Image (cartoon, rainbow, N blue to C red):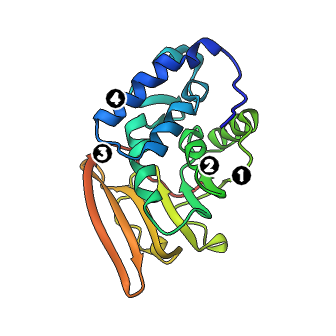
């Protein structure tokens, strides 16, 4: 991974990133390839310069438009879960946000399809990905609540906002053995994983989480 890193190179110190990786390992992230990628992706370029000093803390941070960049633990956890599925060809991310999770996924999958409903975030994310030299992402400004059936099937689908109910329609957009990882709920949210099987699907309930809500339409 060789990223073209703009801005303050002081925020990219190996020691700062190593502390984050060790914190995630202690918190239960066991996939060493995921930990390695988290240690390499320059999270500070995805947040406002005023918050760059907190970029390698394991916390979510505001990115404008009433949205947040997910805490590194959640990014690592969701990535680890989807990677246990069918393959590494195509993944769909619903909710590009600032593009941090997108960049992590792009290190593992041949093509990342990513949809963002907020135009300002989509534009900024596209610029950041280009600056970093991440060219295997197909990002569009659109309503991702129904998935992207025209590009299906996907080896994995990851939703970075909380759906009010289980998004059953997205299961059909998975390959057999593919995984859908998503938060569900309103005030009380839970991370879940659905794996598509030959004869149906299997759902696993995971830990409690806190995400912004998944909304339809464009902004």
- Against 205, is 73 above or below? above
Q: From the viewer's perspective, is 132 left or right of 155?
A: right
**Mark whose residue sits in front, 2 or 3:** 2
Query: Please, what secondary structure does the residue beneath circle 1 have?
Result: loop
Task: Classify the position of the N terminus by image quarter.
Answer: top right
> Which numbered disc flags the more N-terminal residue, 4 or 1?
4
Give the mark toward the camera: 1 or 3.
1
Q: State the separation of the CA atoms marked 3 and 4.
A: 18 Å
Spatial CA distance of label 1 from label 3 is 29 Å
Which residue lies at the image location 53% right of the left edge and 74% below the top edge? 173
Q: Are marks 2 and 1 in contact (CB under 8 Å)?
A: yes
Q: Earlier in the sequence, mark 2 or mark 3?
A: 2
Quarter of the figure with residue 64: top right
Spatial CA distance of label 4 from label 1 is 29 Å
What is the x, y in percent for residue 104?
Answer: 56, 43
> Circle 4 sits in a helix, a strand or a loop, which is it?
helix
Query: Disc 2 or 1, which lies upstream in sequence?
Result: 2
Q: How much space separates mark 2 and mark 1, taking CA atoms?
A: 7 Å
For residue 23, the mark is: 4
Q: Circle 1 sits on which residue? A: 136
Q: Position of residue 160 (x, y in %)?
A: 46, 49
Residue at the limit of the structure toward the front, as seen here: 32
What number is the disc on residue 209?
3
Q: Is residue 182 left or right of residue 86?
A: left
Q: Earlier in the sequence, mark 4 or mark 2?
A: 4
Q: Which mark is residue 165?
A: none
> Does residue 16 lie above or below 101 as drawn?
above
Other-residue count near label 1 (Cα within 10 Å), few / some / many at <14 / 14–19 / ≥20:
some
Dot 2: element? helix
Give the percent coordinates (x, y) of residue 174: 51, 73
Which residue position holds label 2? 106
Residue furthest to the bottom in view is: 199
């Amino acid at each position: 991974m060789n990223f073209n890193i703009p801005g303050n190179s002081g925020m990219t110190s190996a020691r700062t990133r190593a502390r984050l990786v060790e914190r995630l390992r202690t918190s239960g992230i066991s996939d060493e390839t995921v930990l390695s990628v988290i240690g390499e992706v320059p999270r500070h370029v995805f947040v406002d310069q005023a918050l760059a000093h907190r970029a390698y803390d394991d916390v979510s941070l505001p990115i404008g438009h009433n949205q947040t960049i997910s805490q590194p633990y959640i990014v690592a956890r969701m990535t680890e879960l989807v990677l246990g599925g069918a393959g590494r060809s195509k993944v769909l991310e619903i909710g590009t946000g600032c593009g941090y999770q997108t960049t992590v996924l792009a290190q593992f999958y041949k093509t990342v399809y990513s949809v963002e409903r907020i135009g300002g975030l989509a534009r900024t994310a596209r610029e950041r990905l280009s600056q970093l030299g991440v060219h295997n992402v197909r990002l569009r400004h659109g309503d991702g609540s129904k998935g992207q059936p025209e590009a299906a099937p996907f080896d994995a689908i990851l939703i970075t906002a909380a759906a009010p109910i289980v998004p059953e329609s997205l299961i059909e957009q998975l390959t057999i053995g593919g995984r859908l990882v998503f938060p569900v709920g309103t005030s009380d949210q839970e991370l879940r994983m659905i794996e598509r099987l030959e004869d149906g699907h299997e759902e696993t309930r995971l830990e409690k989480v806190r995400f912004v809500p998944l909304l339809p339409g464009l902004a």
